[in-house]
Amino acid sequence: MKSDNKNEVLKEKLKQALTSTARAISDDFKNRDKPDKNEKSKLFDNFDLENLNSKRDFIKARAEADSLALKKKFSDDKIFKKNSPSNLSCKSLYSIAEKIRYESLGCKMLKGIQKNLIENYNQIIESKRKDQLKNKEDVIINEAFELYMIKKFHGIELNTQSKAMLSFWEKDFDQAIEKHIDFLKENLEFQNEYSSKFSEILQEMEIFQNENNEEENNENQEDGQNNPSNDDQESDTEDKKD
């Protein structure tokens, strides 16, 4: 019983520490003396603080708190939505690209943030365990893209398994992104320039172009099935012949 109470006290202290750090990073000092409970709960909606059973869990919570604070500080939701690509598959990669952007700014801002994020990404890389990788279908593109981005922007060394996962997609990513890397890194502080360029890059990638064509073909087929005008025209023609 005492052990449970001790754990709860430690978790509450950790929440308070992470909240204070997040507010400092995001420059959010509003209601610092009388923190809003609802605001506090919202801050931790995206990750779990109830299952902190190891150093690994603590590293993850600390990195996610930093990332959330950096998003609040550096990412404008209106700009994000304005430049968001229309293709659904592109949208998920676009979100990853934006996350890497504001985290990169945080790494430049404070060494402590850089340490927390890199430690967590190293944990993620170490946890990659996929056997019998034979082709692209065995690797989710979102996972491969995240590996590509942390390698290019955070300079994190991938392990053998992560390299194997990325290898199926790296050529496609390089072909579309590599020539724009310098521009993207130079514009990390300018969200509109960075996000509009990334949106453009993703929508022009061949893998998504094929997907767009398939969607258009499916829509055209559905329109043809739902449109009775063709049948009516053929019927009118037959009537005239009679």
Image: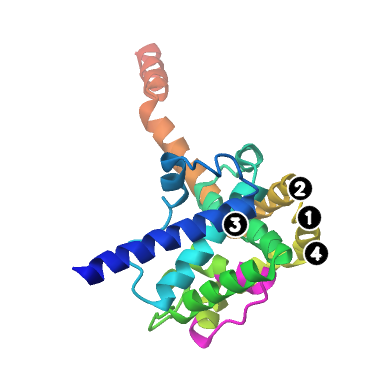
Counting from the top left corner in percent of width and height, residue 216 is at 51, 41
Say whether marks 2 and 4 touch (CB < 8 Å): no
Q: Which mark is residue 187?
A: 1
- Residue type (three-letter) at the residue carrying disc 4: Asp
Residue 149 visible (yes or no): yes
Q: CA distance from mark 1 to mark 2?
A: 7 Å
Q: Which secondary structure, mark 3?
A: helix
Say whether marks 1 and 2 touch (CB < 8 Å): yes
- Residue type (three-letter) at the residue carrying disc 3: Lys
The residue that appears at 76% across and 62% down in the rendered structure is 185
Other residues around mark 3 within 10 Å, as few (<14) / some (14–19) / many (≥20): some
Please state which of residues 232 and 172 is positioned toward the viewer in this rendering: 172
Other residues around mark 4 within 10 Å, as few (<14) / some (14–19) / many (≥20): few
Q: CA distance from mark 2 to mark 3?
A: 15 Å
Residue on which the image places disc 2: 193
Disc on the earlier residue, 2 or 4 = 4
Q: Which secondary structure, mark 2?
A: helix
Disc on the earlier residue, 1 or 3 = 3
